[in-house]
Structure formats: structure tokens, C-alpha cells
């Protein structure tokens, strides 16, 4: 990467970070208003039901490796797992987290352990955060018994999935339980749109934190995304016009 | 409710500080890969070292993950839970593959090509049926304009891609409609979604760097 390209990249990140901090400071004084995403409203209802009827919540984090760019969706899933584990802390059973990557499995155990410290349940169960397989299909095959046999009434599939996610949404459909699904993979998003009750498309998976937790920084991060999106649209339009005029 | 001990507070603060510092150093290493005279910068060396450490840890994590898999299924067998027979099969296969790998490491590929690959290929084939069934259910679950457009597009792409018996490729559909949908409309939509995903990735990374999202179980 050349120095100028590096500086441009650093500038974008620095601008985003500064904007996020500034907006989060402003957001402390004003209540946040979000676009309605029905999937998150239904997720809250499903989580409430999990606590009421003593069933379990299942969060599947996909098979994105932490040392690759696909880790961002899994990290968003882990942050949501932490929040959902807190929300279900009054329930009889801890949530189950499944993943197709060993580092993710360890992080999910750590997250569940941290949440268990503040719950009313007695002890942390290390098998609640589990690795189910190391290839996409073995991972999916390992998750299906969890959906089917472990008294799960709400499923959240959030992370890096491929088309094998259809096997999971199909298993959920057969059990007639709730599912919210989102992936950063385009093929998986198409499959999820067709097969999941509550699909998350595009960057909606990264908005989960703001919708479930709604801290000033989460809300500000959504605004930053919108600002950057408009800047990119403007840049594309200007680029197209300059090309049309023969200047580029 | 448990109260936080001073030691756990110190550990939580230290882990958050180490995470943030590592994240900032790796990020800076990407942006400032070269110094003013065009040589590899110190930040790049630090980034590569940190990434190598992460890869070593990830390798060791696989071993822990396998132990976790063993523990989960052993517990299932012990408690005679539903599906414990399959857990037993899994453990037998795991141990057999491990022993085979120790005795004949040069033949490990045979296990993958004769067992793993055919099983995964059959799951892929099963996916075709699952997706067809899901498409039919889509109209029942969410009957709206977007679902109709989704299904009509999928049908057009299928008809335009696969040669039909007796008819072969359909004129117009195969050489104009399918390429237009796939290369113009779908590509434009996909780029829009990918830009959104990239922006989401950026802000998620920043939230982790700020310590707002703690995906490693640190105390809030």
C-alpha cells in the first residue's frame, strides 16, 4: 500500500472514529430513534418467551475465522450473544452458543461465563459454548441436533455462513421455533431471505447491537454508517459525471 | 448476584487495554506499511508479529475446540440424552481418525476423500431440495411484492442457465435476460449490499476498539 493510499485509509477511519465519538456525546442528550426492523422487535418477544417458559436460546456464530475479514460479523454476533445472555439471565437455562471456528467457540464460552457471573443461575456450563464442526457442512450438521434436541425455542444465526445456512433454517422450521438470521455472505443472504422467518439483509446484522442495547456509541455508529454511505453515493455520482464528461 | 473481585476488575481492564492496543497497532500497520524512504515500517513488523501470534493461538484453539467437542458428546452419552448414539459414533470416528493419523499420517488424505467429501457432497445435494422447499414456503410465509420478484428472478435465472430437454437454451432468455439480470441488476445490488457490509464492518471494528462491544467476555 502506498503512503498516500495508507493516509487516505487512515483518514477515513480517523474521520469515522471522530464522528462516532462526537455523535455519541450528542446522543447522550437526545433519545435515539431507529428505523423499524421487525426482526429485532420479534427477537425481544422471543427472548421474553425463553425466560417465561424455561426453554433455551441458541446463538449460532457461523464459521468465520477471527484472523480474516469475515470475523466482523462473528464479532457482532458475539456482542449480541453477550447482551442476549444478560437478558436471559433470569431464565432457568443458559443460552447455547455454537460455532464452526475454534477461536469463536472459546470466545463464546468466555462471553457466556462473563454473563453467568451476573445471572441467578448457579454455575457456568462450559459445554454451553461449543464447536460443532470445522468445515461449513460439518458445522451445520453439528448444529442441527442442538436446534432439535435441546429445548430451544429461539434461534439467532448471526455470523459468517454460506449456503449451508439453509439446513439450519430448515431444521428450525421443522421445530416450529423462532429464528433470526443474518450473514455477511451474499449467497447466504439470498438463502436466508428465502428460508428464514426473520432475515437480516446487508448491514442490518451490524445494527443488532444498537437495536438490542442502544448505547450512545451504538446509535452513533449507525449514524456514521449513514453519513459514510451518502459520501460514497456522492463520490460514485461525481465519478460517473466526470467519466461522462471525459475528465476521468 | 456476584460482585466483582478487585483481581477480576484488574484482569478485565488489562484484557480490554491489550485488545485495544493490539487492534490499533494492527490497523496502523496496514495503513503505514512503508516508512518515508520506502522501506517496511516498524508498524508492519509489529502487525506481522501480532498476526503470527494470533495464528499460533488459533492453531492451538483448534485442539481445545476438539476437546470441547469431545466433552459435549461424552456428556450426552453419559446422560443418555436424545441422539446419544450419534454422539457415540462421533467419538469413535474422532478417536479412530486420530489413531489413523498417528499410524499412517501419509494416508490421512484418504479419510477426507473417501468419507468427508462424499458426506459433504450429499449434504450439498440435500440443499437443493431444502432450497426448493424453502422457496415454495416463502410465498406462504411472506406474500409480498419482493417475495414475488425474488421467486420470478430465481426462476428466470434457472431457465436461462440450465438447458431444457428438447428445447435446449431458450433464445432471448439465455443470451439476453439472464446476463442482464446477473451482470447488471444483481451485480449493482450486490455492490450496494457489499458497501453496506463494509461500512458495518468498519463501525463494528471501531466499537470494539473503543471497548463498547466486548466480544471476549470482559466485564461491562
Image (tube, grey):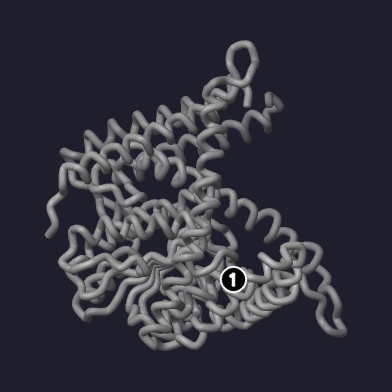
**Nearest the eye: B184 or B217:** B217
Above or below, B70 against B129 in this view is: above
Quadrant for the N terminus of chain A, please: top right
**Relative vertical location of residue A207 with respect to residue A91 in this rendering, above or below:** above
Location of residue A136 (image quadrant): bottom right
Total numbered circles = 1
Q: Residue at x 35, y 68 (%)?
A: A128
Give the percent coordinates (x, y) of residue B33.
58, 24
Please report the residue visible at 29 percent of the width from the left and 55 percent of the height from the top.
Answer: A211
For this orientation, the residue located farthest to the top is B37
- The answer to which of A83 and A205 lies nearer the viewer is A83
Q: Is residue B172 left or right of residue A235?
A: right
* Residue pointed to by mark 1: A137
Establish if B40 lies above or below A208: above
For the residue pair A133 and A216, the one nearer the viewer reads as A133
Q: Where residue A83 appears, x then y in whole percent?
A: 27, 57
Residue at x 81%, y 64% (from the top left corner): B175
- Percent across and percent down for residue B16 are 32, 39
Q: Is residue B77 left or right of residue A233?
A: left
Q: Is residue A161 left or right of residue B22?
A: right
> Which quadrant, please, contains the C terminus of chain A?
top right
Amino acid at each position: 500500500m502506498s503512503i498516500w493510499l495508507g493516509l487516505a485509509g487512515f483518514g477515513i477511519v480517523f474521520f469515522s472514529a471522530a464522528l462516532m465519538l462526537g455523535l455519541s456525546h450528542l446522543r447522550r442528550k437526545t433519545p435515539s430513534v431507529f428505523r423499524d426492523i421487525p426482526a429485532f422487535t420479534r427477537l425481544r418477544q422471543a427472548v421474553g418467551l425463553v425466560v417465561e417458559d424455561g426453554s433455551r436460546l441458541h446463538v449460532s456464530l457461523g464459521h468465520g475465522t477471527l484472523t480474516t475479514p469475515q470475523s466482523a460479523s462473528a464479532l457482532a454476533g458475539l456482542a449480541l450473544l453477550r447482551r442476549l445472555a444478560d437478558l436471559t439471565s433470569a431464565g432457568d437455562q443458559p443460552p447455547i452458543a455454537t460455532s464452526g471456528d475454534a477461536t469463536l467457540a472459546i470466545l463464546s464460552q468466555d462471553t457466556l461465563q462473563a454473563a453467568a457471573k451476573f445471572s441467578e443461575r448457579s454455575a457456568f456450563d462450559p459445554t454451553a459454548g461449543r464447536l460443532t464442526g470445522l468445515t461449513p457442512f460439518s458445522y451445520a450438521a453439528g448444529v442441527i441436533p442442538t436446534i432439535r434436541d435441546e429445548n430451544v425455542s429461539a434461534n439467532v444465526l448471526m455470523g459468517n455462513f454460506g449456503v449451508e445456512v439453509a439446513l439450519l433454517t430448515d431444521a428450525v422450521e421443522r421445530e416450529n421455533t423462532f429464528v433470526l438470521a443474518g450473514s455477511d455472505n451474499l449467497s447466504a443472504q439470498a438463502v436466508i431471505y428465502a428460508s428464514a422467518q426473520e432475515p437480516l439483509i446487508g448491514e442490518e446484522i451490524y445494527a443488532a447491537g444498537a437495536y438490542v442495547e442502544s448505547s450512545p456509541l451504538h446509535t452513533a455508529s449507525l449514524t456514521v454508517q449513514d453519513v459514510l454511505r451518502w459520501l460514497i453515493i456522492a463520490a460514485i455520482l461525481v465519478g460517473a459525471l466526470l467519466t461522462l464528461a471525459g475528465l476521468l | 448476584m456476584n460482585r466483582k473481585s478487585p483481581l477480576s476488575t484488574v484482569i478485565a481492564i488489562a484484557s480490554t487495554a491489550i485488545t485495544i492496543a493490539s487492534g490499533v497497532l494492527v490497523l496502523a500497520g496496514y495503513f503505514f506499511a512503508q516508512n518515508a524512504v520506502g522501506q517496511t515500517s516498524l508498524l508492519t513488523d509489529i502487525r506481522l508479529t501480532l498476526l503470527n501470534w494470533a495464528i499460533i493461538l488459533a492453531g492451538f484453539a483448534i485442539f481445545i475446540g476438539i476437546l470441547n467437542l469431545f466433552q459435549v458428546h461424552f456428556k450426552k452419552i453419559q446422560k443418555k440424552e436424545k441422539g446419544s448414539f450419534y454422539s457415540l459414533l462421533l467419538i469413535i470416528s474422532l478417536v479412530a481418525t486420530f489413531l489413523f493419523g498417528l499410524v499412517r499420517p501419509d494416508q490421512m488424505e484418504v479419510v477426507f476423500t473417501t468419507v468427508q467429501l462424499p458426506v459433504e457432497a450429499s449434504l450439498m445435494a440435500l440443499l437443493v431440495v431444502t432450497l426448493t422447499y424453502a422457496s415454495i414456503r416463502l410465498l406462504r410465509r411472506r406474500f409480498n411484492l419482493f417475495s414475488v420478484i425474488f421467486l420470478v428472478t430465481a426462476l428466470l435465472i434457472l431457465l436461462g442457465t440450465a438447458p431444457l430437454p428438447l428445447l435446449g437454451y431458450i433464445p432471448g432468455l439465455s443470451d439476453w435476460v439472464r446476463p442482464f439480470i446477473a451482470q447488471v441488476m444483481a451485480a449493482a445490488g450486490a455492490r450496494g449490499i457489499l458497501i453496506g457490509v463494509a461500512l458495518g464492518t468498519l463501525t463494528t471494528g471501531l466499537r470494539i476498539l473503543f471497548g463498547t462491544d466486548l466480544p471476549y467476555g470482559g466485564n461491562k
